[in-house]
């Protein structure tokens, strides 16, 4: 049984799509073409993926755009996500310290941050990096279980939110 690209119907083996767990079903050539387009076309593509997705740039490490599912999950408008660091989108308490998201001493061992950085530096995808984040909720802090998968696409990285829920 052949694995055809859902965008161009080309056999996936022709372009190679090994290790692409987030864009699975779309060949590498189509992915690179789509990710070179303007935000509106990119957002349309991301909205068709069946999970909350953030698209991040590497320097500075901020969200370029997100899909509808991510906006719904975080109960935020796209404008409250774009241009922000991941921890700010998740409402991690360390994203709001003086040093900020990814730079606070408490971020050094964050498995989510480290998975994203590893994806940018090595190109290696991460499947199911997880941690517990302390989420800022008005005047209280609530621990949330967070699990993400990452995939590098050109100079950008896709972050799929596999789990984001209050810890029992």
Image: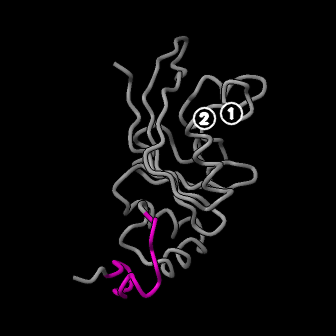
Residue 114 rendering spot, x and y as whole percentages: 62, 42
The residue at the point 56 percent across, 29 percent down is 91
Q: Is residue 13 magenta?
A: yes
Give the mark, 2 or 1, whose residue is nearer the N terminus: 2
> Among all residues in the image, which is located at the extreme left?
1
- Which residue is located at x 61 percent, y 74 percent? 36
Residue 18 percent location from the top left of the image: 44, 71
Q: Helix or strand or loop: what does disc 2 sit on?
A: helix
- Assign the N terminus to one quadrant of the image: bottom left
Q: Position of residue 138 (x, y in %)?
A: 53, 16
Given residues 87 and 3, the one toward you in this image is 3
**Element marked by disc 1:** loop
In the picture, which quadrant includes the C terminus? top left
For the residue carrying disc 2, how many other residues have a C-alpha within 10 Å: few (<14), some (14-19), or many (20+)?
Answer: many
Is 131 positioned to the left or the right of 63 in the image? left
137 or 7, nearer to the observer? 7
Residue 11 falls inside the magenta stretch: yes
Q: Is residue 45 above or below residue 107?
A: below
Which residue is farthest top? Answer: 139
Q: Are marks 2 and 1 in contact (CB under 8 Å)?
A: yes
Q: Which picture quadrant has residue 96?
A: top right
Looking at the image, residue 157 sits to the left or right of residue 67; the answer is right
Res 107 → quadrant:
top right
Mark number, residue 101: 1
Residue range of the region highlighted in magenta in the rendering: 4-20
Q: Where residue 50 sits in the image (x, y, percent)?
A: 33, 56
Q: Residue at x 74, y 33 (%)?
A: 103
The residue most toward the right is 98
- Which mark is drawn over residue 115? none
Of 153 and 125, the residue lying toward us: 125
Q: Which mark is residue 87?
A: 2
């Amino acid at each position: 049984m052949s694995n055809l690209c859902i965008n161009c119907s080309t056999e996936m083996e022709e372009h190679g799509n090994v290790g692409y767990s987030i864009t699975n079903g779309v060949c590498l050539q189509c992915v690179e073409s789509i990710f070179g387009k303007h935000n509106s076309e990119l957002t349309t593509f991301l909205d068709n993926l069946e999970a909350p997705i953030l698209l991040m740039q590497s320097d500075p490490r901020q969200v370029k755009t997100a899909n509808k599912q991510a906006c719904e999950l975080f109960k935020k408008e796209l404008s409250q996500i774009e241009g922000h660091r991941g921890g700010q989108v998740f409402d991690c308490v360390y994203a709001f310290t003086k040093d900020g998201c990814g730079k606070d001493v408490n971020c050094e061992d964050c498995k989510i941050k480290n998975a994203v950085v590893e994806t940018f530096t090595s190109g290696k995808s991460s499947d199911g990096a997880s941690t517990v984040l302390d989420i800022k909720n008005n005047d209280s802090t609530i621990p949330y279980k967070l699990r993400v998968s990452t995939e590098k696409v050109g100079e950008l990285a896709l972050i799929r939110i596999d789990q984001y829920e209050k810890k029992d």
